[in-house]
């Protein structure tokens, strides 16, 4: 079946590229979940970003041959269900690794040099130099958990800052900056997370995890929010185990659905000056918007030997 459904807003090059590969492409970004489930069996391919969670139940009556996720993570796709049905699953981790690395560096520099707070103060007519004295990244030790495309991109750039890099990946150990978690606990001044959301990584950042670090750390999470729940993050800030926090992701990114508890937790976290937030845009650049499509189209072409 050569019909492909694009169900999310993606760069126009995706539809053009699939058409050039011989697929019949339909873009239907206005579908409700019920409508999507109803029409999906008529398509052989699916391009999705984050509009719907692709579950085993949704897949059971389909004839899909591939699912292309226009992004890095696959936590919204039941990969095991896909593989059991012979559905190829493609993601585009390579497409936004440059964007993520630059975003992480921007967050780190902002925290280290207090750019976010000093900018606000100057706009308010305050000229406080000593209170905005920062620190240099050179000579500091960066721990990276997850050494895939994102982790490698961050490591290669920040090593040029004169930092020591320690990279841990349980499934793909780093040949460039190999380290154990014990070494990261002992030596890290900063920690950047670049791991997928799985049953193993959900809630990784816990009170016990933070207490394992010998020194207070700056923690950067640009992977998935549920890896670092709000409660232990607040604990880390209160106790000084976290000296700085940069979050591009949150456990619940639908802010209008927050419970009173979630609102209170976030409000207290955000009250700490050494915190900086962004709305899940680390990999969301003009360039990555296009490069994600290039990566997916290359993988689809190779899979079908087109």
Image (cartoon, rainbow, N blue to C red):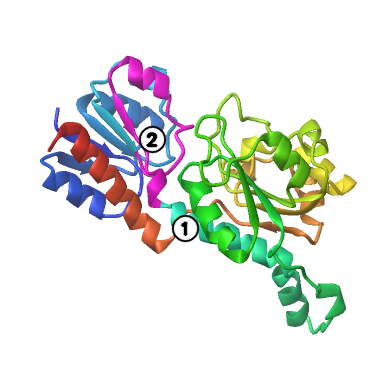
Q: Please name whichever residue, 243 or 262, is drawn nearer the observer in this view of the structure.
A: 243
- Quadrant in the rendering for residue 88: top left
- Quadrant in the rendering for residue 163: bottom right
Mark 2 to mark 1 CA distance (whole Å)? 31 Å
Task: State left or right for residue 170 relative to residue 140.
Answer: left
Q: Residue at x 43, y 24 (%)?
A: 78
- Would residue 240 be seen by someone viewing this image from the given angle? yes
Task: State left or right for residue 154 relative to residue 80.
Answer: right
Look at the image and tell me in which quarter the C terminus lies: top left
What percent of the width, then of the height, locates residue 47? 30, 39
Instruction: Give the mark toward the camera: 2 or 1.
Output: 1
The magenta segment: 69-95
What percent of the width, then of the height, locates residue 127? 82, 84
**Residue 72 counted in the magenta span:** yes
Residue 36 marker? none
Q: Residue at x 47, y 53 (%)?
A: 283
What percent of the width, then of the height, locates residue 199? 58, 24
- Would residue 282 be seen by someone viewing this image from the given angle? no
Look at the image and tell me in which quarter the N terminus lies: top left
Dot 2: few (<14), some (14–19), or many (≥20) neighbours within 10 Å? Answer: few
**Farthest-out residue, right:** 239
Q: Which residue is mark 1?
A: 99
Dot 1: few (<14), some (14–19), or many (≥20) neighbours within 10 Å? Answer: many
Badge 2 element: loop
Q: Which residue is mark 2?
A: 32
């Amino acid at each position: 079946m050569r019909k492909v459904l694009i169900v999310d807003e993606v760069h126009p090059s995706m539809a053009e590229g699939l058409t050039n590969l011989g697929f019949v492409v339909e873009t239907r970004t206005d579908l409700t979940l019920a409508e999507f489930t109803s029409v999906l069996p008529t398509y052989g391919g699916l391009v999705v970003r984050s509009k719907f969670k692709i579950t085993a139940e949704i897949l059971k009556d389909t004839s899909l041959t591939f699912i292309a996720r226009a992004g890095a993570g696959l936590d919204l796709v039941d990969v095991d269900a896909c593989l059991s049905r012979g559905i190829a699953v493609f993601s585009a981790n390579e497409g936004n690794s440059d964007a993520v690395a630059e975003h992480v560096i921007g967050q780190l520099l902002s925290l280290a040099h207090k750019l976010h707070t000093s900018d606000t103060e100057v706009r308010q007519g305050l000229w406080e130099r000593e209170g905005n004295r920062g620190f240099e990244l050179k000579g500091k030790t960066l721990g990276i958990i997850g050494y895939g495309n994102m982790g490698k991109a961050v490591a290669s750039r920040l090593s040029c800052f004169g930092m020591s890099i320690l990279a841990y990946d349980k499934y793909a150990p780093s040949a460039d900056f190999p380290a154990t978690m014990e070494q990261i606990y002992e030596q890290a001044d900063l920690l950047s997370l670049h791991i997928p959301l799985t049953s193993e990584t959900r809630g990784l950042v816990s009170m016990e995890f933070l207490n394992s670090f010998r020194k207070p750390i700056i923690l950067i999470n640009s992977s998935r929010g549920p890896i670092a729940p709000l409660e232990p993050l607040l604990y880390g800030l209160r106790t000084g185990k976290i000296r700085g926090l940069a979050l591009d992701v949150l456990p619940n990114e639908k802010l209008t659905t927050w419970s009173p508890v979630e609102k209170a937790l976030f409000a207290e976290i955000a009250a700490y000056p050494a915190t900086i937030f962004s709305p899940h845009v680390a990999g969301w650049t003009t360039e990555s918007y296009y490069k994600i499509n290039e990566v997916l189209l290359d993988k689809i072409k190779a899979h079908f030997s087109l």
